[in-house]
Amino acid sequence: MSSSKLSPSCKEGSLGTPWGLHQVCEKIGEGKKVGTVFEGRISIGLTVEECSLEQRSRNLITSRILRLDGLELRVNRGGEVDSYKRFIYIHGTNHEEKIGTPSSSGCLQMLNSEIIELFSIIPIGTHLFISLS
């Protein structure tokens, strides 16, 4: 898994990975091909391989999305520290070689095969604790 390339942060606009207790509140991409690219939580109708070189140079959201909702008021829920409003996800990436190193813009990234497996076994409402260590 990879987290943000910037310092951890719950604050809106920080691009840091938020900490604390979260729950999976939405699952997006069921049945889509491995490597399907999403923008704004909607498939663009292409897989990574079908995207342009310019598109592939970016860190894309691929395969599946588990949207997170913070559960701790004033930590990751409400006001300027709301994980849901920040669109924090667990998702696949087109830069799998960077998994295990800080490389996202706040989300948690996984190998495409692993996010597809995780997506298939956890229900909406599953709790997740994101630790700073």
Image (cartoon, rainbow, N blue to C red):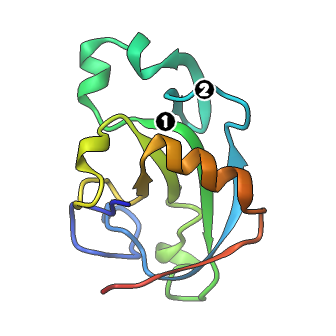
Q: Is residue 11 above or below residue 109?
A: below
Q: Residues within 10 Å of mark 2 (few under 14, many from 20)?
A: some
- Hey, which quadrant is residue 108 in on the image? bottom left
- Residue 125 rendering spot, x and y as whole percentages: 77, 70
Instruction: Identify which residue is drawn at 72% across, 58% down.
Output: 121
| Residue 15 spot, x, y in % from top left | 32, 60
Q: Residues within 10 Å of mark 1 (few under 14, many from 20)?
A: many
Residue 43: mark in rendering: 2
Give the labeled residue for mark 1.
62
Q: Using the numbered discs, state the Cα–Cα distance from disc 1 to disc 2 in whole angstroms.
A: 9 Å
Label 1 vs label 2, nearer the camera? 1
Number of labels in the image equals 2
State the SS at label 1: strand
Rendered-image quadrant of the C terminus: bottom left
Frontmost residue, 115 versus 103: 115
The amino acid type found where label 2 is placed reads Ser
Q: Nearer the viewer, residue 76 or 56?
A: 56
Q: Marks 1 and 2: CB-CB under 8 Å? A: no
Q: Position of residue 35 (x, y in %)?
A: 49, 28
Residue name at image x 54 percent, y 76 percent: 79
- When the figure is inspected, residue 44 is found, relative to residue 60, above or below; the finding is above
Image vertical order of residue 110 relative to residue 32, above or below: below
Q: The N terminus lies in which quarter of the figure?
A: bottom left
Residue sitting at 31 percent across and 21 percent down? 55
Q: Amino acid at mark 1?
A: Thr
Q: Is residue 128 left or right of residue 61?
A: right
The secondary element bearing badge 2 is classed as strand
| Image position, residue 10 (x, y; %) | 41, 76
Q: Foreground residue, 28 or 110? A: 110
Residue 75: assigned label = none
Mark 1 or mark 2: name the one nearer the start of the chain: 2
